[in-house]
Amino acid sequence: MLTKTVALGVADKGIRINGIAPGAIDTDVNKDVLENKEKKNPEEQKIPMRRIGTPEEVTKVALFLASSAARYITGTTVYVDGRLALLT
């Protein structure tokens, strides 16, 4: 709700506010799970796309939202989670 509220408050100034909600991403934070097949496989099975995301996938979304290609997008959250949020 914060993203929507702030976006509404500054939209008339040409400022865009968007959020990125990453799911399970291959980073050092998840290292203990990623390096253990017995832990990794069950986690991947919970994700509709059946895999862990990459940092590059999140970066590409951030770059897009910061680009002029997204100049008419504001007040939204992009889920980069293999569609895991769909299940909640």
Image (cartoon, helix red, strand yellow):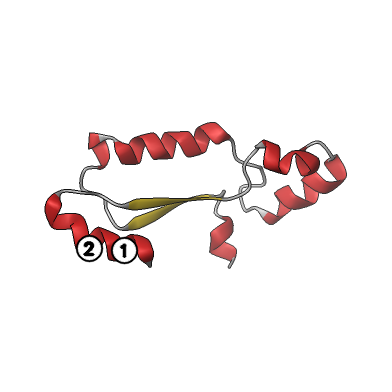
State which quarter of the image contains the N terminus. bottom left
Q: Residues within 10 Å of mark 1 (few under 14, many from 20)?
A: some
Q: Where is residue 42 in the image (x, y as percent from the top left)?
A: 79, 52
Q: Where is residue 70 in the image (x, y as percent from the top left)?
A: 26, 42
Q: Find residue 45 and name its label.
A: none
Residue under label 1, please give it. 4
Residue at the far top in the pictured view: 56
Q: Residues within 10 Å of mark 2 (few under 14, many from 20)?
A: some
Q: Position of residue 44 (x, y in %)?
A: 71, 48
Among the 4 quarters of the image, the one containing residue 31? top right
Residue at the far right in the pictured view: 38
Which residue: 58% across, 50% down?
23
Residue 8 versus residue 47 in the image, above or below? below
Q: Residue 46 or 54: which is nearer the viewer?
A: 54
Asked if labels 2 and 1 touch by Cβ distance under 8 angstroms, the answer is yes
**SS for tag 1?**
helix
> Is residue 23 left or right of 59 when viewed as pictured?
right
> Is residue 16 left or right of 60 when viewed as pictured?
left
**SS for tag 2?**
helix
Q: Residue 4 or 73: which is nearer the viewer?
A: 4
Q: How many labels does the image show?
A: 2
Which residue: 58% across, 68% down?
88
Amino acid at circle 1: Lys
Q: Where is residue 41 in the image (x, y as percent from the top left)?
A: 79, 46
Amino acid at circle 2: Leu
Q: How far apart are marks 1 and 2 (CA)?
A: 6 Å
Among the 4 quarters of the image, the one containing residue 66? top left
Q: Find residue 8 and name its label.
A: 2
> Is residue 6 left or right of 21 when viewed as pictured?
left
